[in-house]
């Protein structure tokens, strides 16, 4: 399930106030569930299996018993970086005026 707007090859736009819920599995895997806003009661925009390895955007991070929540505070993109056998993802800030 991925309803994120594409921002280029292997890149997707995230909402300014997106929340990314990272569930950490016992086997070391992760499931990223992406919501446009933590306050809305809308269903998730996307679910992705992989590892969130870095957040290069203004955010708050809240630890939970099953993982953590990344609460974005600026425009950003989810960028896929193919790894050996596992997909790695980075959240990067974007310039709103650049059309990204």
Image (cartoon, rainbow, N blue to C red):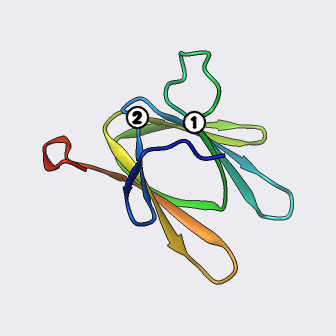
Report the mark closest to the observer, 2 or 1.
Answer: 1
- Residue 66 location, x and y as percent? 78, 42
Q: Is residue 18 placed above or below 8 in the rendered structure?
A: above
Q: Which mark is residue 15?
A: 2
Q: In the figure, 13 relative to 72: above or below? A: below
Q: Secondary structure at mark 1?
A: loop
Residue 42 placement (x, y as % from top left): 60, 20
Mark 1 closeness class: few <14, some 14–19, many ≥20 residues within 10 Å: some
Percent across and percent down for residue 58 are 34, 41
**How many numbered badges does the structure rendering display?**
2
Q: Earlier in the sequence, mark 2 or mark 1?
A: 2
Residue at 41% x, 29% y: name it: 17
Q: Is residue 89 left or right of residue 23?
A: left
Label for residue 77? none
Furthest residue to the bottom? 84
Mark 2 residue element: loop
Instruction: State the CA–CA distance, disc 2 to disc 1.
Output: 10 Å
Residue at 72%, 56% (x, y): give it: 30
Identify residue for label 1.
45
Residue 82 pos. (x, y %): 55, 76
Residue visible at 53% across and 16% down in the picture: 39
* Callout 2–callout 1 Cβ contact below 8 Å: yes
Q: Residue 69 occupies which quadrant of the picture?
A: top right
Judged from this view, the residue extending furthest toward the right is 26
Give the vertical position of 98 relative to 79 (above or below). Answer: above
Front in this rendered view, residue 7 or 83: 7
Mark 2 crowd level (few <14, some 14–19, many ≥20, 10 Å Cα): some
- Is residue 69 or residue 18 the one in the foreground? 18
Taking depth in this image into account, of 33 and 67 the one nearest to the observer is 33
Question: Is 78 positioned to the left or the right of 63 in the image?
Answer: left
- Left or right, 30 with respect to 75, comes to right
């Amino acid at each position: 399930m991925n309803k994120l707007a594409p921002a280029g090859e292997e890149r997707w736009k995230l909402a300014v106030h997106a929340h990314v819920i990272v569930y950490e599995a016992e086997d070391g895997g992760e499931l990223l569930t992406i919501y446009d806003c933590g306050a809305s009661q809308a269903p998730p925009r996307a679910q992705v299996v992989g590892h969130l390895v870095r957040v290069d955007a203004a955010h708050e991070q809240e630890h939970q018993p099953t993982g953590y929540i990344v609460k974005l505070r600026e425009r950003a993109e989810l960028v896929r970086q193919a790894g050996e056998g596992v997909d790695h993802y980075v959240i990067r800030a974007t310039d709103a005026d650049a059309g990204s």
